[in-house]
Amino acid sequence: MKKDIHPEYRPVVFHDTSANYSFLTRSTIKTSRTIVWEDGNEYPLVNVEISSKSHPFYTGEQRIVDTAGQVDRFMRRLQTAQSRQAESAQRRQTKQEQPRKPSLYQEVFGDDGQPTGEQPAE
């Protein structure tokens, strides 16, 4: 192993701030804070928000997800989307029922393809 390229592996105290729980382990983490541990020695201190004492998976205090609220929100969105689709279909239906304006070609030549105002040559 090369010298002076690896971080120092040393005892460190991790403090869980949410559970007010501390434990001593070894780590290479760098910190400027220190604490006097139960054995009377001074160790580097790292504050963490979650540890095995406060994480719901390890404590058995799993949170129950409010799926009823999610279902209600989904049903509201679904109902809104369905009403918009129905309105759109009704608009398309009324648009199809309206008589179509004759095209410029039909205005000039009529339905039979002859110019209006002129009689077909016999």
Image (tube, rainbow, N blue to C red):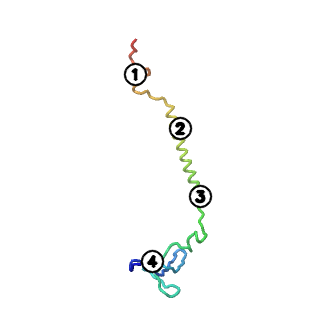
Vertical placement of residue 24 versus 99, above or below: below
Give the spatial CA distance, label 4 vs label 3: 42 Å
Q: How many numbered discs, if any?
A: 4
Earlier along the polypeptide chain: callout 4 or callout 3?
4
Residue 30 image offset from top left, x and y in percent: 43, 77
Residue wearing tag 2: 90
Residue 109 marker: 1
Decide which of tag 1 and tag 2 comes sooner along the chain.
2
Which residue appears at 50% of the width and 88% of the height?
40
According to the picture, the residue beneath numbered tag 3 turns out to be 67
Compute the Cα span from label 2 to label 3: 34 Å
Closest to the camera, between mark 4 and mark 2, is 4
How far from the left and from the top, in percent, is residue 122? Answer: 40, 11
User: How would you rate the neighbour count of disc 2 (Cα within 10 Å): few for under 14, some for 14-19, many for 20 or more?
Assistant: few
What's under tag 4, amino acid-wise? Answer: Thr
**Label 3 is placed on what type of residue?**
Thr
Q: Which residue is mark 4?
A: 28
Tell me the amino acid under the disc marked 1.
Phe
Residue that protrudes farthest toward the front in the picture: 1
Residue drawn at x 42%, y 27% as measured from the top left:
103
Badge 3 or badge 1: first in the primary sequence: 3
Q: Which mark is residue 60?
A: none
Residue shown at 51% from the left, 31% from the top: 97
Residue 27, image x, y percentages: 47, 78
Q: Are marks 2 and 3 in contact (CB under 8 Å)?
A: no
Q: Residues within 10 Å of mark 3 (few under 14, many from 20)?
A: few
